[in-house]
Image: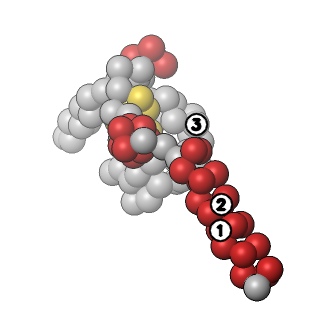
């Protein structure tokens, strides 16, 4: 009988500890929200782009630092502070 009381007491103590350290609903929702991000062109280091371009088809394939066609996701509003552009670079004119 002593072991069953010990197990029950431990379970209750564990539940109380979890309830004291648990997050409220609003805290959990705030943690689930991702910060707003934007594509930033021209700031990517070699091999660190987030997606394909006309030059290559996959993330991580940037061949040079700061190529104007390669982009990376950054926090909303920080692209120009990092020296990049938020708009797609113009396509070269073909002759």
Front in this rendered view, residue 3 or 59 = 3
Q: Would you say the residues marked 2 and 3 are in contact, meaning their CB atoms lie under 8 Å apart?
A: no
> What colouring style does the render use?
secondary structure
Q: Quadrant of the N terminus?
A: bottom right
Front in this rendered view, residue 49 or 4 = 4
Task: Locate residue 23, reporting x and y percent.
Answer: 48, 43
For the point 35% across and 20% down, the residue is: 77
Q: Quadrant of residue 20?
A: top right
For the point 47% across and 55% down, the residue is: 59
Would you name the residue on which mark 3 appears? Answer: 45
Would you name the residue on which mark 2 appears? Answer: 14
Task: Locate residue 81, reporting x and y percent.
Answer: 45, 14
Marks 1/3: CA–CA distance: 52 Å
Q: Label 1: few (<14), some or many (≥20) within 10 Å?
A: few
Front in this rendered view, residue 69 or 44 = 44
Would you name the residue on which mark 1 appears? Answer: 11
Task: Report the residue that reaches farthest toward the right.
Answer: 2
For the point 36% across and 50% down, the residue is: 53
Task: Locate residue 92, reporting x and y percent.
Answer: 26, 36
Classify mark 2: helix, strand or loop: helix
Q: Would you say the residues marked 2 and 1 are in contact, meaning their CB atoms lie under 8 Å apart?
A: yes
Q: Quadrant of the C terminus?
A: top left
Classify mark 3: helix, strand or loop: loop
Marks 2/3: CA–CA distance: 48 Å
Of the residues under marks 2 and 3, which one precedes in the sequence?
Answer: 2
Q: Is residue 68 visible?
A: no
Q: Would you say the residues marked 1 and 3 are in contact, meaning their CB atoms lie under 8 Å apart?
A: no
Q: Quadrant of residue 15?
A: bottom right
Q: Label 3: few (<14), some or many (≥20) within 10 Å?
A: some
Of the residues under marks 1 and 3, which one precedes in the sequence?
Answer: 1
Task: Locate residue 6, reporting x and y percent.
Answer: 76, 73
């Amino acid at each position: 009988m002593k072991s069953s009381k010990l197990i029950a007491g431990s379970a209750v103590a564990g539940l109380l500890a979890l309830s004291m350290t648990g997050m409220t609903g609003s805290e959990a929702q705030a943690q689930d929200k991702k910060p707003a991000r934007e594509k930033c062109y021209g700031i990517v280091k070699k091999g660190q782009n987030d997606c394909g371009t006309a030059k290559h088809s996959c993330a991580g394939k940037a061949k040079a630092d700061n190529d104007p066609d390669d982009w990376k996701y950054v926090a909303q509003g920080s692209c120009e502070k990092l020296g990049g552009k938020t708009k797609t670079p113009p396509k070269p004119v073909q002759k």
